[in-house]
């Protein structure tokens, strides 16, 4: 059975802090790992990672994948209150639109 | 761009009632799927479809039916609602690719079964 585990489950920080969110997985036929941000409604796409060691960056957010150790991290630097959300990690074993999600990490950023 | 549209946004059902959650996408995506989201459990796949006329079960299919008569629409039917089906339901669509591709999500339907 495919499995995706995120840690920590929740995190409370102050503005300006740097956070690291973790995602480990055990899936058959791994193809890609995706990160989503979810603020009250639908998840919104952040990154897709398919190869080890390649860092994806978008502003203050960055992510890297380790296919040998089966994990990914999402870093957020200089956090802002607008970063408060649930961050979801998902793994796609195939290209058929089937994603296996982790439980999510609830990030709360205080002013 | 409408993207993925789900209706209704909120619904309260009595145990044993049936209903259909609607999902439509206007991006001509071949792949569509339904997820449910419960506290502390992330999103779990209910059913998915790789094209019109083709559907398959996901991780938690019991109590739900789907059909895909057109590329655009992928309704989810609850046959006889149970309190355990109280959840937030998301429909998603994506396009084919060598890798799992970005899924575009609808805004969700919050369902309460009493």
Image (cartoon, coloured by chain):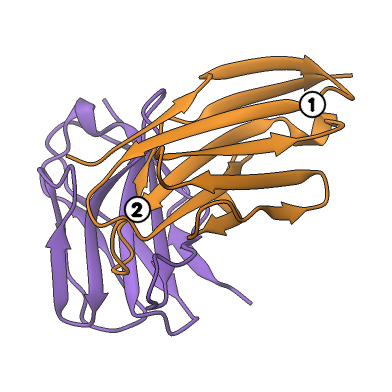
Chain colours: A orange, B purple
Q: Which residue is mark 1?
A: A18
Tell me if residue B85 comes above or below residue B36 in the rendering.
above
Query: Percent x, y for residue A20?
Result: 66, 28
Kindly tell me whether residue A42 is visible in this rendering: no
Q: Is residue B110 above or below residue A52?
A: above
Q: Secondary structure at mark 1?
A: loop
Dots 2, 1 in contact, CB < 8 A? no
- Image position of A36 (left or right of B92): right
Instruction: State left or right for residue B49 relative to residue B93.
Output: left
The image quadrant of residue B13 is: top left
State whether discs 2 and 1 lie on one chain: yes
User: Label 2's element?
Assistant: loop
Q: Quadrant of the N terminus of chain A?
A: top left
| Foreground of the two, A9 or B90 | A9
Pair 2/1: label in front? 1
- Look at 40% across and 69% down and name the residue there: B99
Which residue is located at x 53 percent, y 30 percent?
A: A22
Q: Which residue is mark 2?
A: A99
- Taking A84 as reference, is B64 above or below it? below
Chain on which label 2 sits: A
- For residue B9, side relative to residue B48 (left or right): right
| Residue A89, position as x, y percentages in the image | 48, 41
A97 displayed left or right of B53: right
Q: Quadrant of the C terminus of chain A?
A: top right
Q: Chain of mark 1?
A: A
* Residue B112, picture quadrant: top left
Q: Residues within 10 Å of mark 2 (few under 14, many from 20)?
A: many
């Amino acid at each position: 059975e495919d499995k995706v585990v995120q840690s920590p489950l929740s995190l409370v920080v102050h503005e300006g802090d740097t956070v690291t969110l973790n995602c480990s997985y055990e899936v058959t036929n791994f193809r890609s790992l995706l990160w989503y941000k979810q603020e009250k409604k639908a998840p919104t796409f952040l990154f897709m990672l398919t190869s080890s060691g390649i860092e994806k960056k978008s502003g203050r957010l960055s992510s890297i994948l380790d296919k040998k150790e089966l994990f990914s991290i999402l870093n957020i630097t200089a956090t802002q209150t607008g970063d408060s959300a649930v961050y979801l990690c998902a793994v796609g074993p195939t290209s058929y639109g089937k994603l296996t999600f982790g439980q999510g990490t609830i990030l709360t950023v205080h002013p | 761009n409408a993207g993925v549209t789900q209706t209704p946004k909120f619904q309260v059902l009595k145990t044993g009632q049936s209903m259909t959650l609607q999902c439509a996408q206007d991006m001509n995506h071949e792949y569509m799927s339904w997820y449910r989201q419960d506290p502390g459990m992330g999103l779990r796949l209910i059913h998915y479809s790789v094209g019109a006329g083709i559907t398959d079960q996901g991780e938690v299919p019991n109590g739900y039916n789907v059909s895909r008569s057109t590329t655009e629409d992928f309704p989810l039917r609850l046959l006889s609602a149970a309190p355990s089906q109280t959840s937030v339901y998301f429909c998603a669509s994506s396009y084919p690719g060598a890798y799992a591709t970005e899924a575009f999500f609808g805004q969700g339907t919050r369902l309460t079964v009493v």
